[in-house]
Structures are given as C-alpha cells and as structure tokens.
Image (cartoon, grey):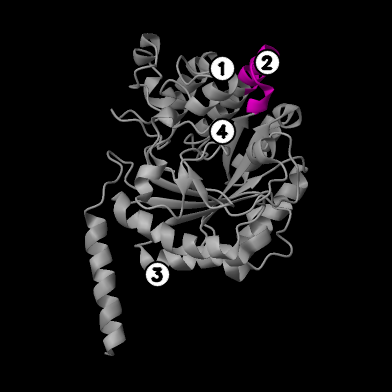
Amino acid sequence: MSLESVKQDHEKRLKMEAAEERIQGKDGWNKFPLFWFPLFLSYRCTRRCSYCYAFNQVGDDSHPEMDENTFSRLLTWIPEVWNVNHVKVNAISFLGGEPLLRTDRIRKVMDAVCSHTDGMQGLVNTNGDLVDSVAWDDLEQIRWVTVNITDIGIGELSRRMKIIRDRSNVINQTIAATLDDFNLERIIDISRFGIENGYRLRFSKNLFKGADTDYKRRVLKKYHELCDLLEDYCVHGYDLHTTFLIDLLIPLWDLDESPYPCGKRIAAVFPDGTIGPCLRDHAFKTGTIFDADPLSKIRCSTFHFDVGESDIPTECRVCESKTTCQGGCPRDKLLLTGTRSGKSVVCEIHKEIIPRLRYLEQLKPVRPRSGR
C-alpha cells in the first residue's frame, strides 16, 4: 500500500470517528438533516415566477452569479463549517435561480463535500426546464430532486420527471407547487398524479398574497380537500409523506426542542458570497463566507423558529399543534406584520390542518421513519 493510500485511509478513519460523536435526531429522526446549506450560486433563471422569493427581493441583482474567487472560497468554506457544526446529518441544497444552468458547479461542490467531510445529502431544486440538455454526469452525486411544477401541464411534468428518473441517480423525486391562483385550483390533480406515480408532494402558500383573507380562505378549503384525498389514498395502501408536505411543516415532531434550524443551523449562501440565517429572506445578511468564526455568523435570534421564544404568546405554548407550528415562521411574520412576535400569520390554517396531517400518519402502516 502506498504512503498516499495510508494517509487517505487514516484521514477517512478520523472522519468516521469524528462523525460518531456528532449530534443527530432522536427517536426515529436519526436520518433527518439538522444542518442545512441552502446554496444560491446564481440568480439566473429560465423563468420569472411572481411568487419566487429571490425574484421578489433581488430582481436583476448586480451579482447574478457567484464569481470564481467566491466560488473557490465556498469549496473550502463548506467543509470548514461542517468540521465545527458537530451535526451528524447535513444537507446541501442547490437553489436559485435555476441551478441546472451550472451543473459543473454542482459537481464541484459535491466533490468537495465528499472529499472533505463524511458526506451530505445532496438536493437540487429545479423547474425542470433544462432536463433535455443537462449534463447528467455532473449530477451523479445528487440523490434528491424537487421539481417545481410552475405553470406547465401535468403531462409535461410527467415527461420531465421520467427523464430525471431515467438519467440520474436520484432515489426520490418531489413535486413542489407554490399555490398561486392557477396551482391552487389544480392541487388535487397534481396530488393524484404525484401519489399514483410514487412522487412526494410539497405545497407552499403564496406568501406574497400577504394578508389577503379571501386567499387564505381558499387555501384552507383546498388543504382540507387535499387531506380528504390523502386519507382515501392512505387507506388504500399508498405510501404518503407529511414531512414538508404543507408549508415546510414537520407534523410528527413531538420532541421538546424545535425541529426548525432557522437562525441556528441554516447557512444560506448567496451569489455575492454573503450568508444569512434564512433561505427565504434574501435581504437579511449576517456575514460572508470570507469571515472568521462561520457559525457565529449564521446565528441570529430574530429567526429562531421556536415556540419557546419569549415573544411567542401563551396561547401558542399550550396549543396542541405547538411542536409542529412552533408559533409560526418568524420570517413570514416579519414580512407581513413587521415584527417576529405574536402568533403564526396562518394560525387558523395550522390549527385545522396540522391535526389532519397527524391523523394521516396514524392511518399508515408502521414503517421505519426516514426523517424526510
């Protein structure tokens, strides 16, 4: 055995020993990522969706794509953060913009992760516009792909997801839909297609509808219709997943601590090399990837998504849905009310829908939980 091979084996063994000492989820959540790296390497996109967080906050930003110097630093920065975050399961999530415009960078990031950490879950979030021309070899280490249906038909969505299944190494595909007026009306059709083809589902409200009471009323009605549909599929033996199904909620979390890493274990990186504690707030930055002490730069109490925070009402602390809702997303409250205090901006929706999501899980046969 060569000296180089001995060195590599030694380094690998040290990584494994260090990994065994890292914190991870409890009581069936051991595979759930407790640290997230949402990477916005570019704001370039094939679309301009009205509900896109990036488009609404930065538009045609002066830093549309990460420059080479910053990207080079990112490749060393991610392992550095991993080395000090003491978390067992980490996730790298490629967002944008449209990440499939630069698959070469996805490959380089994943190569750096595999070489200098004990590995992370690799996720790509795409609109699927480029699946016919993408360099699939660049995505060989990606196991999770989420396709945003945007405004395309279900037939075209089916074609795109089949290409991803046939040409990539994914073990799971998710259909995501932000509920603008168009997708809100076809949520049942999207769900039927996804369930019957073995895809996971993820639905998010259009937050830029603000406090529109009519919109929230329609969303609640459609969520109930969705739960009716899912219950029917569940009793007929279909394997359904409620984690992240609606507004990124984690319905089954019933542990004492909050499951949401916001302001604690999210290292969102933006195209200009700035970092922040929230993947949906592209205006709030806490540092850069060139700063020392990276963990301190992503810790921000303003974004702590936790019912135990002092400005969460007593009503929330005794609510039966508290371990899932956690008082509501701080970023949503900041956007719509100007303060992170108070109840969730969709409290009435959560009170009705979270119990239904939990009931769905009771209908399912007992299986080992994947945490995803």
The location of residue 187, given as percent across then percent down, is 68, 31
- Real-space CA distance between mark 4 and mark 2, rounded to the nearest whole angstrom: 32 Å
Residue under label 1: 337
Majority secondary structure of magenta residues = helix
Badge 1 crowding class, 10 Å Cα cut-off, few under 14, some 14 to 19, many 20 or more, is: some
Which contiguous range is marked in magenta? Answer: 206-222
Asked which secondary structure carries label 3, the reply is helix
Badge 4 is on which residue?
A: 233
6 left or right of 185?
left
The Cα atoms of the two marked residues, 3 and 2, are separated by 48 Å
Sequence-first disc among 1 and 4: 4
In primary-sequence order, the first of circles 3 and 1 is 3
Which residue was labeled with disc 2?
212
Residue at image location 66% in from the left, 34% down from the top: 178
Residue indicated by mark 3 = 115
Say which residue appears at 76% left-offset and 40% top-offset. 151
